[in-house]
Image (cartoon, grey):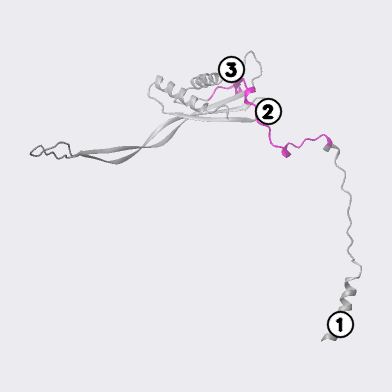
């Protein structure tokens, strides 16, 4: 056995010392295309934060008022949205000047499930004292109640407002608000104003 190992050892050493047939080679990188020197890859950098302070004027997207429905007309929606934008410091573009923002709005009715907890109140006991020789003993009362949950369906008016950058048409902000529509015209107008106010409550985003 030792003689076999002695014969194999020189062969293994000779194999290790033989030249490696694999030779590492490197090829030069191909030249960059001519447009690489002037092309800016925006995807390689995070988007710059949007400056909402520069948006000061607005106009309707597509030069069209919002579409109305049986609950509110397009003119009523437009007036409420315009008043809400004015409270946010946004003014309508005047005299054909280009606007900073393009605005669209719509309204629709949705169903909501509401739950109200009432309490079935009960009361028992009382207070006072009795006894002889000036000795008094109190009696106390106690209160108890069990919650009663009632579920009902109600209709709400939902207003959605979308802002677009007038320069490139890209959407930059969207908000929605809702309110319970009233029965007569005055209550509906108030509900519309409340829904618009809720939709614009988080503009500009912080």
Residue 91's label in the rendered image is 3
Residue 168's label in the rendered image is 2
Q: Earlier in the sequence, mark 2 or mark 3?
A: 3
Element assignment for label 3: strand
Residue 142 percent across, percent down from the top left: 22, 40
**Mark count:** 3
- The N terminus appears in which quarter of the rendering? bottom right
Could you say which is closer to the camera, residue 191 or residue 148?
Answer: 148
Q: Nearer the viewer, mark 1 or mark 2?
A: 1
Direction right: furthest residue: 19
Mark 2 and mark 3: span between their CA atoms? Answer: 20 Å
Q: Which residue is mark 1?
A: 6
Residue 153 percent across, percent down from the top left: 38, 36
Residue drawn at point x = 84 percent, y = 84 percent: 4
Element assignment for label 2: loop
Compared across the picture, whether 72 is left or right of 41 comes to left
Q: Please give the range of residues in magenta.
A: 37-66
């Amino acid at each position: 056995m030792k003689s076999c190992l002695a014969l194999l050892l020189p062969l293994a050493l000779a194999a290790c010392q033989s030249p490696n047939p694999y030779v590492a080679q490197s090829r030069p990188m191909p030249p960059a295309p001519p447009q690489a020197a002037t092309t800016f890859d925006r995807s390689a950098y995070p988007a710059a934060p949007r400056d909402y302070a520069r948006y000061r004027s607005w106009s309707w997207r597509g030069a069209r008022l919002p579409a109305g429905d049986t609950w509110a007309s397009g003119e009523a929606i437009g007036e409420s949205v315009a008043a809400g934008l004015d409270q946010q410091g946004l003014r309508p573009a005047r005299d054909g000047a280009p606007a900073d923002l393009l605005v669209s709005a719509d309204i629709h009715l949705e169903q909501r499930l509401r739950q109200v907890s009432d309490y079935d109140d009960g009361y028992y006991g009382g207070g006072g004292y009795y006894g002889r020789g000036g000795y008094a003993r109190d009696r106390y009362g106690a209160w108890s109640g069990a919650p009663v949950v009632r579920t009902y369906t109600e209709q709400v008016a939902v207003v959605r407002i979308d802002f677009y950058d007038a320069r490139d048409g890209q959407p930059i902000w969207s908000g929605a608000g809702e309110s319970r529509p009233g029965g007569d015209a005055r209550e509906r107008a108030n509900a519309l104003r409340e829904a618009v106010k809720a939709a614009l409550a988080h503009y500009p985003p912080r």
